[in-house]
Image (tube, rainbow, N blue to C red):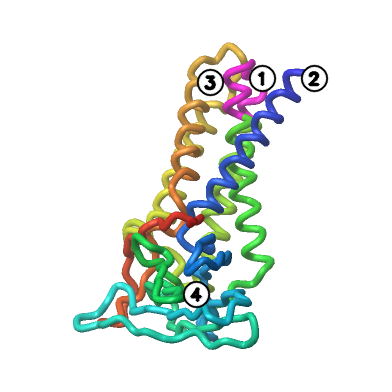
């Protein structure tokens, strides 16, 4: 009983850790900032995920009337001759607002925000532009179940790893659950989410080079092999234990790669969907 509690406690801690890591590294999560311009401190976030049906609003809360801001943007990847657009934020009381124009599915825009006061300018992000991505509306139930299944697969993978290290009493059921959840979350629901968002079920190999699709395929195949090896596994089956350890390391690699870092991208010149790398801007600036 104590060993089972230890296995699942460590598995939960590891899974929560990876979940928090994903929310801090993914290129579609907001970029939070905490800056000072002209003696005025400003906190906020830049939105990087938008709906194809509407412009993407960027909002700044700043009561200081002397502070102004410009939204600087261009299409990503930039077509030949593309130049940066400078759009002043509109002030409404203590709120500043500006909008990135809506794009087609997988359309992306790179942008920064320039804050001005008393001749001083502070740019966020300051090292490289953030990239905003537009997607089609995904039914909430499909998206939630997809995410839930994927992190449950990581939970069972972590539990299998702890079980292999501490006793290896439940490798058969844990490997089956890991494979089943990864197959359901990544192999079934993943393509459904992709279709709603970007009008394509699969953009990994051999159709493309989408890292998210490819890493899920690698994970599912790996855990299928692990499940087969562990089919009749017991505590004395060293091969099963080592297979689970290898499978868990693959899961770590999969969840360690930021989601959507190399995914569907609209080529604004040809109108085709390609896969393009997006730099992972630090999600906390200040």
Q: Is residue 199 visible?
A: no
Q: How far, Cα to Cα, is label 4 from label 3?
A: 41 Å
| Image: 214 above or below 135 | above
Q: Residue at x 45, y 86 (%)?
A: 88
> Which circle's residue, 2 or 3, is located before the other in the chain?
2
Q: Nearer the viewer, mark 2 or mark 4?
A: 4
Q: Is residue 167 magenta?
A: yes
| Image: 136 above or below 220 | below
Segment colored magenta: 160-172
The circle drawn on residue 135 is: 4
CB contact under 8 Å: marks 1 and 2: no
Q: Nearer the viewer, mark 1 or mark 2?
A: 2
Mark 1 closeness class: few <14, some 14–19, many ≥20 residues within 10 Å: some
- Find disc 3 in the rendering and name its residue: 241
- Find disc 1 in the rendering and name its residue: 169
Q: Residue at x 36, y 70 (%)?
A: 265
- Find disc 2 in the rendering and name its residue: 1
Q: Is residue 121 visible?
A: yes
């Amino acid at each position: 009983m104590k060993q089972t509690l230890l296995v699942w406690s460590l598995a939960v801690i590891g899974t929560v850790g990876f979940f928090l890591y994903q929310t801090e590294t993914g290129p579609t999560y907001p970029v939070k900032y905490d800056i000072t311009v002209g003696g005025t401190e400003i906190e906020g976030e830049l939105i990087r995920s938008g709906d194809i049906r509407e412009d993407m609003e960027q909002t700044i809360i700043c009561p200081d009337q002397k502070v102004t801001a410009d939204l600087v943007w261009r299409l990503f990847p930039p077509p030949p001759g593309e130049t940066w657009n400078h759009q002043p934020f509109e002030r409404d009381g203590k709120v500043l607002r500006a909008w990135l124009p809506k794009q087609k599915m997988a359309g992306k825009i790179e942008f920064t925000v320039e804050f001005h006061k008393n001749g001083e300018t502070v740019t966020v992000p300051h090292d490289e532009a953030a990239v905003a991505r537009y997607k089609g509306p995904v039914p909430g139930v499909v998206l939630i179940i997809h995410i839930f299944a994927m992190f449950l697969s990581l939970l069972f993978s972590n539990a299998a790893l702890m079980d292999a290290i501490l006793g290896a009493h439940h490798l058969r059921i844990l490997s089956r659950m890991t494979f089943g959840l990864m197959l359901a979350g990544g192999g079934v629901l993943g393509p459904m989410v992709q279709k709603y968002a970007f009008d394509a079920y699969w953009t990994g190999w051999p159709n493309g080079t989408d890292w998210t699709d490819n890493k899920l395929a690698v994970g599912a195949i790996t855990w299928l092999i692990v499940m087969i090896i562990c089919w009749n596994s017991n505590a004395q089956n060293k091969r099963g234990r080592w297979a689970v350890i290898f499978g868990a390391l693959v899961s770590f690699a999969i969840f360690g790669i930021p989601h959507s870092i190399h995914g569907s991208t609209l080529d604004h010149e040809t109108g085709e969907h390609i896969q393009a790398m997006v730099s992972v801007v630090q999600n906390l600036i200040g």
